[in-house]
């Protein structure tokens, strides 16, 4: 990227003039201010996003005289007299008489290239720069052009496809038409199954979407947390009142004693243990001990050393072994042995079955912390309105936030309003509170609006991570490949506070068998406290870690009995009648065998090609093919998790859809509407969406555990069907009558009911309104039918499971230890593909995260707390992904649909790791398999062979 001119020195307050999106602007202030900040805060062009302020993420990319630059690295003085184009100006910017940006925006919509949308402005700007100088680029040139812009959601493939598509159109060549969304809305009643363009897509591509940091009340004060620099430390405050007095612009400092209600919160109330502000001792690096509130400039000017606190660093418990050691200090007094919780699923007699097995394999695997690395750091604002508090912030769980904020302030939940903004990626971490408690406490006391925006480093040090896991397992099978027993034990490092540790501990034992029939089974888990950042929810709740272990073990068993690894899985795959490890017989909708069988011809071809390649070369490059299966229960484990959807028929004939499923990029705004529209029989354009706000939308639970399509979708289906029946009743028509939206002739507001040869026109303009302000309101609640698990984990943990299998083709450089993934083929049983484009987007994004998990991503608390050192896959790392959608309908899900969000990430890493073993015959026991670890494993295997040879 360009953009390294020297800023011209200006006296403070002197005006700097330049053009933005064709308009001349003049800004005052320091010429050293970041351009990104001036664009957003002074010019209101919040389409330019800030993900790191360090040149690492590319979210802030703008055009400077036609060249893409990171606006966070450009001083405003550098742009004097220049032309700056932001995402807001792309549609009107023309080059050679054509709007490349406008065409790209349309292509992004039709390809589903924008999910959360946080990276989208930067992507569009970088792509515009490419196509303006190279109208018909090759795929590699596209990947290079967007290589500096990170996306955590899409897996890049749809972005690349959209850019190539826009380029093709730009050159006047016929559109390829591949993987595009539907530009035209489907007929009433035919939305399910269509590649509908996401309903909230336009604002994501034109820069008008409101994320957490994009809206601020006038005169809002800034909030900054003071955080522990140590993993464990005692602290003592100095003169806080004097600090406020001596710092003009600072209005207040709040600490634990200023929390009006309980200084304690947590996503699972039974285990709530996290303070808003630590009291006396910080239990992890990054834990907040106080908040400083004041004018933005004053708060930003503060140096950490200015704050009156003294620290006494204490010895931390940094890993599972230290925490479990006999006599180890307790991190929470009420949790003996530093064990937060245990999980257990036992079926049959595993010891006896392993003794009797023809083949037994043992294995150990370890995984590290993984950072969510969404492009949008946490942000929001709060204001007090009389005796109520309003918090607007990025969140995955507005009603859970409401309960916790109410408890923190000591007020009734009805006095708390949570307004979710668009969420620039969450993947589980934005289920937990971040900025919200600080904002709520500050606004409550001061009676003034307050705003808080996390820096990238603050986001990384203080928010939850994927649990590191240490897994030991032993599996046995018969000589003809029938799985007989699996003994699985895992410890998860849950960090200093509970967060979702109990959920991980409960979910993993149910899933560690994989989607196979295992008659004798024992899975025991523990969540262990340490003095590290809390681990929480991250796409899969521990199941991706377990799949890494179990799927590699199954490959080893297949090898030992001389069976093809895919056929081994097909032989053992669950079906509608075989019981799971919790004794559940699903009865229908078990599509794992179909997922595996659809891979069979591709598997054979890929294996043959890899073998031919390996035979053809004597160099360091070796190819391998790996496969892995997965299953994942949708929704909470054996716990209620209802969603309630309300829809209202308005006097103008439109439908208000109150659905509170927060769309974090996965597409629930669109999918839930598609389901509701078909249940009602209304066209999509009739719907007005009201999302998430706790003041106007019933509780749809949290966006997690792949539950929104199933649970909220089902509630939307039921509400739609109920409204349909109510309309027919109003017209005095039978259930078999048809409904047409439109009153006939040119009247668009009425409804026509056709009952045989009778036609009823319902004129709604003067109809009385109910308590919700609608002509008719329909509300429905759905809670998936589950049952509690007994002491051995037997019962019905989930009503619906999703299934899938991935095949990875890779190339390894055995000299360097580097791994290149050549292709991933992903087959998923989604029950019913409500919107195939959005499902493919979930799969491709899941593959990218799985690839990062397998090969590159590990967070070490205290080190590399930025996106420069913590590497996530960029466009150049991602191979082609072939998605195959299997539709084995669930009898429970809406139109047969199942979830896909977590499912998509689970099998990628084990498939890649199995391919690594296939290529060079080594197992890397500590994941990710980074080049140094791969190289070390190769050398260790080499030494072992030498020893064996020496022994003769
Ligand atoms: S915000 Fe500028 S590169 Fe990340
Ligand atoms: S769509 Fe790219 S970061 Fe979310």
Image: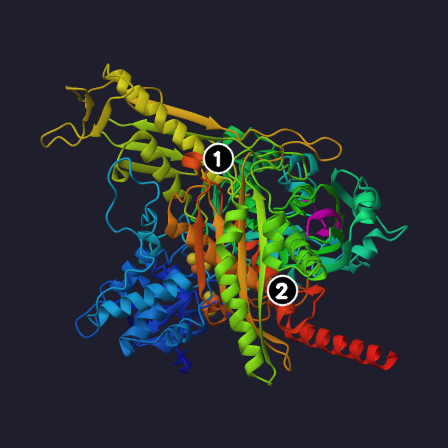
Q: Is residue 734 above or below residue 117?
A: above
Residue at 84 percent of width and 79 percent of height: 947
Disc 1 target residue = 711
Question: Quick check: can you spot residue 22?
Answer: no
Left/right placement of residue 310 relative to residue 680 reads right
**Residue density around tag 2, few if under 14, some if 14–19, many if 20 or more, within 10 Å:** many
Residue 472 placement (x, y as % from top left): 77, 54
Question: Quick check: can you spot residue 137?
Answer: yes
Left/right placement of residue 570 relative to residue 767 reads right
Residue 505 placement (x, y as % from top left): 70, 44
Q: Is residue 239 above or below residue 658?
A: below
The quadrant of the image that shows the C terminus is bottom right
Q: Residue furthest right?
A: 327
Residue at 74 percent of width and 78 percent of height: 939
Give the residues in magenta.
481-498
Front-most of residues 29 and 116:
116
Q: Label 1, secondary structure: give it.
A: helix
* Mark 1 vs ligand 2: CB below 8 Å: no
């Amino acid at each position: 990227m360009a953009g390294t001119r020297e800023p011209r020195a200006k006296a403070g307050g002197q005006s700097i003039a330049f053009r933005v999106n064709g308009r001349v602007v003049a800004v005052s202030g320091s010429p050293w201010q970041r351009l990104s900040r001036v664009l957003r805060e002074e010019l209101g062009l919040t389409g330019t996003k800030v993900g790191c302020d360090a040149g690492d993420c590319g979210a802030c990319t703008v055009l400077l005289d036609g060249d893409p630059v990171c606006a966070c690295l450009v001083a405003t003085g550098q742009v004097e007299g220049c032309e700056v184009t932001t995402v807001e100006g792309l549609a009107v910017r023309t080059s050679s008489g054509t709007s490349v940006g406008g065409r790209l925006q349309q292509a992004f919509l039709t390809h589903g290239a924008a999910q959360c949308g946080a990276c989208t402005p930067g992507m569009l700007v970088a792509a515009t720069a490419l196509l303006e100088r190279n109208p018909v680029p090759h795929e590699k040139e596209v990947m290079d052009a967007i290589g500096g812009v990170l996306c955590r959601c899409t897996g890049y493939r749809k972005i690349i496809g959209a850019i190539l598509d826009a380029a093709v159109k730009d050159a006047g060549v016929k559109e390829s038409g591949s993987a595009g969304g539907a530009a035209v809305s489907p007929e009433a009643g035919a939305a399910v199954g269509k590649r509908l363009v996401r309903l909230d897509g336009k604002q994501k591509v034109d820069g008008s979407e409101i994320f957490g940091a994009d809206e601020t009340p006038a005169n809002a004060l800034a909030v900054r947390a003071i955080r522990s620099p140590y993993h464990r430390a005692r602290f003592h405050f100095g003169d806080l009142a004097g600090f406020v007095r001596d710092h003009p612009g600072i209005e207040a400092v709040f600490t634990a004693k200023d929390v009006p209600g309980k200084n304690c919160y947590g996503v699972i109330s039974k285990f709530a243990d996290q303070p808003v502000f630590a009291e006396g001792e910080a239990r992890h690096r990054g834990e907040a001990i106080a908040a400083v509130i004041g004018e933005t400039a004053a708060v930003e000017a503060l140096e950490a050393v200015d704050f009156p606190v003294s620290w006494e660093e204490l010895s931390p418990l940094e890993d599972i072994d230290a925490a479990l050691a006999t006599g180890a200090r307790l991190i929470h007094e009420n949790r003996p042995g530093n064990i937060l919780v245990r999980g257990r699923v036992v079926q049959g007699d595993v010891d006896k079955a392993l003794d009797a097995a023809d083949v037994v394999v043992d294995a150990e695997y370890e995984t590290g912390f993984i950072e969510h690395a969404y492009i949008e750091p946490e942000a929001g604002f709060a204001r007090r309105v009389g005796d109520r508090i309003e918090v607007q912030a990025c969140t995955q769980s507005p009603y859970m936030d409401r309960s916790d904020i109410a408890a923190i302030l000591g007020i009734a939940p009805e006095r708390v309003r949570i307004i979710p903004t668009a969420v620039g990626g969450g993947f589980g971490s934005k289920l937990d509170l971040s900025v919200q408690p600080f904002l709520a406490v500050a606004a409550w006391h001061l009676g003034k609006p307050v705003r808080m925006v996390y820096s990238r480093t603050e986001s990384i040090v203080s928010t939850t991570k994927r649990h590191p896991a240490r897994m030991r397992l032993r599996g046995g099978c018969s000589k003809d490949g029938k799985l007989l027993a699996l003994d699985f034990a895992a410890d998860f490092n849950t960090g200093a506070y509970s967060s979702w540790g109990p959920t991980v501990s409960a979910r993993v034992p149910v899933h560690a068998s994989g989607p196979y029939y295992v008659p004798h089974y024992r899975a025991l888990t523990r969540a262990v406290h340490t003095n590290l950042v809390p681990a929480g929810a991250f796409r899969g709740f521990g199941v991706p870690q377990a799949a890494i272990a179990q799927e590699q073990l199954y490959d080893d068993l297949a090898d030992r009995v001389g069976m093809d690894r895919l056929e081994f899985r097909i032989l053992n795959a669950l079906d509608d009648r075989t019981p799971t490890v919790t004794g559940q017989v699903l009865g229908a909708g078990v599509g794992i065998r179909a997922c595996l069988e659809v891979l069979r011809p591709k598997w054979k071809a890929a294996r043959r090609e890899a073998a031919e390649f390996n035979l053809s070369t004597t160099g360091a490059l070796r190819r391998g093919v790996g496969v892995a299966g997965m299953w994942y229960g949708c929704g909470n484990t054996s716990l209620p998790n209802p969603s309630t959807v309300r829809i209202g028929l308005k006097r103008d004939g439109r439908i208000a859809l109150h659905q509170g499923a927060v769309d974090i990029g996965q597409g629930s705004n669109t999918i839930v509407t598609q389901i509701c529209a078909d249940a009602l029989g209304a066209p999509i354009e009739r719907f007005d969406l009201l999302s998430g706000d706790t003041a106007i939308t019933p509780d749809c639970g949290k966006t997690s555990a792949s539950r929104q399509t199933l649970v909220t979708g089902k509630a939307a289906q039921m509400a739609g069907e109920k409204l349909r029946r109510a309309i027919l009743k109003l017209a005095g028509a039978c259930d078999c009558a048809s409904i047409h939206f439109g009153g006939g002739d040119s009247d668009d507001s009425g409804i026509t009911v056709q009952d045989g040869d009778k036609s009823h026109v319902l004129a709604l303009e003067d109809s009385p309104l109910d308590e919700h302000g609608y002509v008719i309101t329909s509300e429905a609640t759905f809670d998936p039918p589950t049952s509690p698990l007994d002491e051995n984990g037997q019962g019905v943990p989930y009503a619906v499971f999703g299934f899938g299998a991935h095949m990875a083709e890779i190339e390894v450089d055995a000299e360097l230890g580097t791994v290149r993934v050549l292709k991933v083929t992903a087959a998923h049983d989604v029950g019913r593909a409500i919107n195939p484009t959005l499902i493919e987007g979930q799969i491709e994004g899941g593959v990218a995260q799985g690839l990062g998990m397998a090969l590159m991503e590990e967070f070490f608390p205290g080190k590399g707390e930025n996106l420069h050192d913590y590497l996530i896959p960029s466009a150049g790392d991602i191979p082609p992904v072939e998605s195959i959608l299997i539709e084995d309908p669930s009898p429970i899900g809406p139109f047969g649909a199942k979830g896909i969000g977590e499912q998509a990430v689970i099998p990628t890493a084990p498939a890649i790791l199995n391919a690594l073993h296939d290529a060079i015959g080594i197992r890397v026991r500590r994941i990710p398999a980074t080049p140094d670890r791969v190289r070390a494993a190769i050398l260790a295997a080499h030494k072992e062979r030498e020893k064996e040879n020496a022994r003769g």
